[in-house]
Image (cartoon, rainbow, N blue to C red):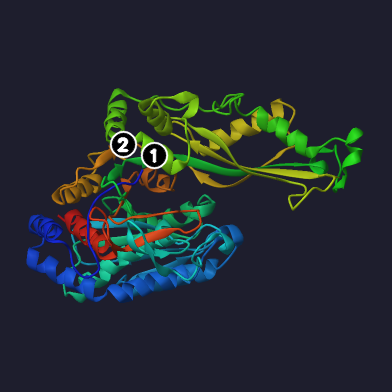
Amino acid sequence: MRRASFVSGRNALTAGIAAMLLAMGNAHAFDAVDRAAIKAEVGKRHDEALKRLQDWIALPSIAAENRNSKEGAEHMARLAREAGFQKVEIVPTDGKPGVFATLDAGAKKTVGLYFMYDVKQFDPAEWSSPPLEAKLVDKPGYGKVVVGRGAVNQKGPESAFLAALHAIKAAGKKLPVNLVLVAEGEEEIGSPHIGQIALKPEVQKALAKTVGVFMPSAEQEPDGVVTVSLGAKGVVELELVSSGEKWGRGPVKDVHSSLKAMVDSPVWHLVKALDTLVSADGNTITIDNYPQPRPLSADEKAMIAKAAERGDEAQTKQRFGVQHWIDDLPWLQANERLVSQPTVNIEGLVAGYTGPGGKTVLPHKAVAKIDMRLVPDMTLKDAVAALKAHLAKRGFGDIEVNVSGGYDSTSTAADAPLIQAQIAVLKRAGIDPVMWLRNAGSYPGYVFTGAPLKLASGHFGLGHGSGAHAPDEYYVIESSNPKVAGYDGAVMSFVDYLYELGK
């Protein structure tokens, strides 16, 4: 859902883009001279900013593997201090620690920031460039990109935001807003303890003074379209575990498969349970008393229709490697379904022997890794309760439901100052953004948009990257595409956004 257009190479812009940027500067609450001074510092500090990103990628904090959680928080805290945050605190939780920081610029307005430094697992054998070396690689049609785990999700954009703070300070200019930072190391496992950071009394008090909270991101796609999203689905991450021990049937250890003639199978038990959760085609949730989604309003349908008109269905199918949408829905209805419907998805199934060849065993245990996406009027609590009751009612009460993380959906009004500032910056750059109701993916914005804070929340940032959660994840550093910002252009987009928010 991220699309946009804004251009910057490392050293110079084309004449047309330079004129566009000058127009942006003239329209801001700071004059063109100030903006030019900051921009000069961005260029001057390009190499140090890139090195900062590469060093960050080299330290993977992976909550799912209990890897570098302490070190990840300490590194985040150091980055915040170096960027000018006067108060920086590592916040312990019942899980992995997070970071809370404040920067008092003496400004009238305060803006909240959400950072994540947790990254997904990776298999180096699947990468064409080592995932922790963050090498600069030539990518045809894009230019020079940095390849590494966390490059775009989310360290690249976050490092670009920090580079904006360094440049403003180095130029001798006053930061136009105060900042409150909440950073966590568990986003990739469903942010199970984000509330223990953001709702800690001191942190909550600081956030309550903000105009909203945004996450630095790379919102440009190669087609030159930028999407401004007003929300995201919620998510539940869990495992369903069937075992001979818990069931009281089947073996308590793997046994020879010939014994299936007289011994129950925990694996088949799990498969049969999974089959009750959805319709025969796997597309309709059939969990008893499952919470129902809120129907789309006429205004919401109109927003989706307008966005669909600007999308390219054939290109989207090609990018995803699919030939059909569910039920062979037309493009518009497929987008409506994407935005409005909850899902129950099997991420992975693990049981018995999975190595080369065969091994005739009857496994004693099977695990299904599940994610369930949630939309407005649905809560994690209600979804999990319905799932447990459904399994018990259907004779599968022995199957363990182990929730590892998750949160409710998030929504922000289009007229919120946080969103209107994004639109203003983009339009000054000659970009007509696509307004999008809700990302199909998830992030823990609920902790900001829900009670007790009830703040606006969103994503912003120019630049492009892709491959999140996949091999060869990348973030554009020196762009060869006239519609996509390089790293310095992304940095300047954050400068422009901060000054717009400070109006």
The structure residue drawn at horizontal position 16% and vertical position 47%, both measured from the top left corner, is 427
| Residue matched to label 2 | 311
How many neighbours does mark 2 have within 10 angstroms: few (below 14), some (14-19), or many (20 or more)?
some
- Residue 378: x, y in percent? 47, 32
In the image, residue 8 above or below residue 59: above
Sort mark 1 into few (<14), some (14-19) or many (20+) by Cα contacts within 10 Å: few
Quarter holding the N terminus is: top left
Q: Residue at x 45, y 68 (%)?
A: 57
Q: Secondary structure at mark 2?
A: loop
Q: Secondary structure at mark 1?
A: helix
Q: Is residue 342 left or right of residue 229?
A: right
Residue 155, horizontal then vertical, whole percent: 40, 62
Q: Quadrant of the C terminus?
A: bottom left
Give the CA separation, mark 2 to mark 1: 8 Å
Amino acid type of the residue tagged 1 in the rendering? Thr
The spot of residue 446 in percent (x, y) is: 41, 44
Q: Is 304 situated left or right of 408 in this image?
A: left
First in residue order: circle 2 vs circle 1: 2
Can you give x and y, in whole percent of width and height, for residue 114 in the image? Answer: 37, 56
Give the residue at the far front of this rendering. Answer: 140
* Disc number for residue 316: 1
Q: Considering depth in this image, is 27 or 401 the residue closer to the camera? A: 27
Q: Is residue 126 visible?
A: yes
Question: Contact, CB < 8 Å: mark 2 with mark 1?
Answer: yes
> Looking at the rendering, which quadrant does residue 181 occupy?
bottom left
